[in-house]
Amino acid sequence: MNLIEKILAAHSSAKTVKPGQIIDMRIDARVARDFGGANVVKNLIENGLEPDDVSKTFFTFDCDPGGSDQKYAANQHFCRQYAREKGIQVYDVNSGIGTHLAIDHGLILPGGTFVSTDSHANIMGAIGAFGQGMGDQDIAAVWASGQSWFKVPESVKLTLTGRRPKNVSAKDIVLNLLERFGANSLLGVAVEMHGPAVDELTLDERITIASMGTEMGTISILFTPTPAVIVELEKRSGKRIPIISADADGVYKQEIEVDISNFKPMVAKPGHPHDDIDIQAVKKTKIDSAFIGSCTNGRMEDLRIAAGILKGKIVAPGVVLKIVPATDDVWKEALEEGLIKIFKDAGALVSNAGCAGCAAGQVGQNGPNEITLSTGNRNFAGKQGKGSVYLASPAVAAASAVAGYITTPDDLPMEPATFTAQGISLGEARAKVRPESSPLEFTGKIRLIPIDDIDTDMIFHNRYLTITDIAEMGQYTFDNLAGYEKFAGEVQPGDIVVTAKNFGAGSSRQQAVDCFKSLRVPLILAESYGAIYERNAINAALPILTYDKALLEELELHNGDTVTVNLESGAIRNERNQKTGSVQPFSMVQMDIYKRGGLLNK
């Protein structure tokens, strides 16, 4: 077996597993964060469920560690009360990013399994473990049972050949890979990294690359731990670390070689993490702010690199540099090494540990028309604020903050760029929904949205994440998708949404599914789905099906046509011209959950 198959088999009743097989998998560590935690608890209470094993169950408050938003603060306190009652450990607002805490504190070890309401839970691939982001219903079910169903993914063996250039960081490696593979060509597969250049990667570098597996559409980017990584993990966790690796004759869907010697320092242009370009093409682009942190680049190695560039220098006039360590342990180590003083002397804002701007609950957000250079993993429109966000490495972020424009550490100006004057213009609990029936056939008018990679921030923006009442969610559907902002006011109950590839990419938020239930949209058809979104929809009993792109031409489907779709057979008919075709029907698991009215319904 390959690496992910060995991990999944070891946590199931099967001795071996194969791609496409659906298994019940035991989960070693089960985590809910502050924005998802309240919904997890409400799901448990409403369904009369109890945590299976509190020693493996955790809360991590990393999205809004300042508690500056009243609804976040209310959700955090609600979770604390539940944790006190049940004896669940809380990594509170002073702790940092939950996935990093899990690695550093040994909540998850190589070969282990981890789930969280964090869509970057697959960061565990950095240590050769399985991590999966899940919606709040999924997590509630895992808390109650200690296990979850999972479809074994196909694996791709990706070998980096050649020597890594000295000016190419771990962030540059993953941006180069994103530039090559995009957001959906590796959709739903596990990517296993190999090669001499991979073996040389440190733990922090592996975390950077694994963190952006979500942006690449993968289930996970997995690394086999080296002896050096094992030693570091044992030192951090105080635990003996097991050895895990793929079998020599492991089977892969595809084996790909990529020459790392051709990699260059890159940036992702605003809007999409996979819209990457050689940094030379955007050099001297004036910036308003820079951000160093997130689960991708908030480790000690990242801060040391930034400090080496900032030492003895000052952030350019008018530019704001925000630095957020990944964990409190990293913060303390940076303080002991004198890095915090270097940052403050340079004029940076240093915040307490956490997710920062990615989660909209801490420093790192930008305003309208603001241009930010960020070390985060996402730059979707509206994700880190109302401005434009470029993604780059900590070295580039630090150098650009000093220069006042995008640049590299080896090309700092004698004097920083300055701005020129110009005219400017200035919870309730989730309502429990149980359908009266579960029809196997739907007839409805098509709402065609022919756009690839519609992410969850476009479907249901993160500014509404504190909403827990499904009845309130529908009004915000697609209000962050350009051209479809009026969708919620125009769609009619019974309308069927038809979209393109990788629908639901990005975050693990359940609301991006529930908003369609709120609008009484009975069915979504797409060429493919983001892995987490697909699980959330199935578990919420929202019918979703996949179709081949040629189907639109075969049926001559146009926006506004009426179609009839059978969930069991996959038969589809265009009622306008009576042309017929087929889509992927429900799997047995999907049908079972759908008929029950949702994962948590008995």
Image (cartoon, rainbow, N blue to C red):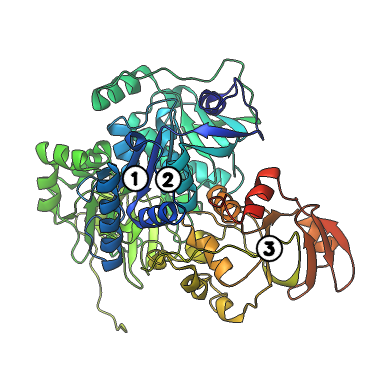
141 or 253: nearer the viewer: 141
Q: What secondary structure is marked by label 2?
A: loop
- Residue type pointed to by label 2: His
* Mark 1, other Cα within 10 Å: few <14 / some 14–19 / many ≥20: many
Q: Are marks 3 and 1 in contact (CB under 8 Å)?
A: no
Q: Are marks 2 and 1 in contact (CB under 8 Å)?
A: yes
Total labels drawn: 3
- Image-quadrant location for residue 155: top right
Dot 2 corresponds to which residue?
120
Residue at image location 27% in from the left, 63% down from the top: 74
Q: Earlier in the sequence, mark 2 or mark 3?
A: 2
* Disc number lying in front (2 or 3): 3
* Disc number lying in front (3 or 1): 3
124 or 142: nearer the viewer: 142
Residue 231 appears at what percent x and percent y? Answer: 29, 19
- Per the model, the C-alpha gap separating discs 3 and 1 is 43 Å
- Per the model, the C-alpha gap separating discs 2 and 1 is 8 Å
Residue 123 appears at what percent x and percent y? Answer: 41, 39
- In the displayed orientation, state which residue is furthest to the front: 48
Dot 3 corresponds to which residue?
437
Dot 1 corresponds to which residue?
295
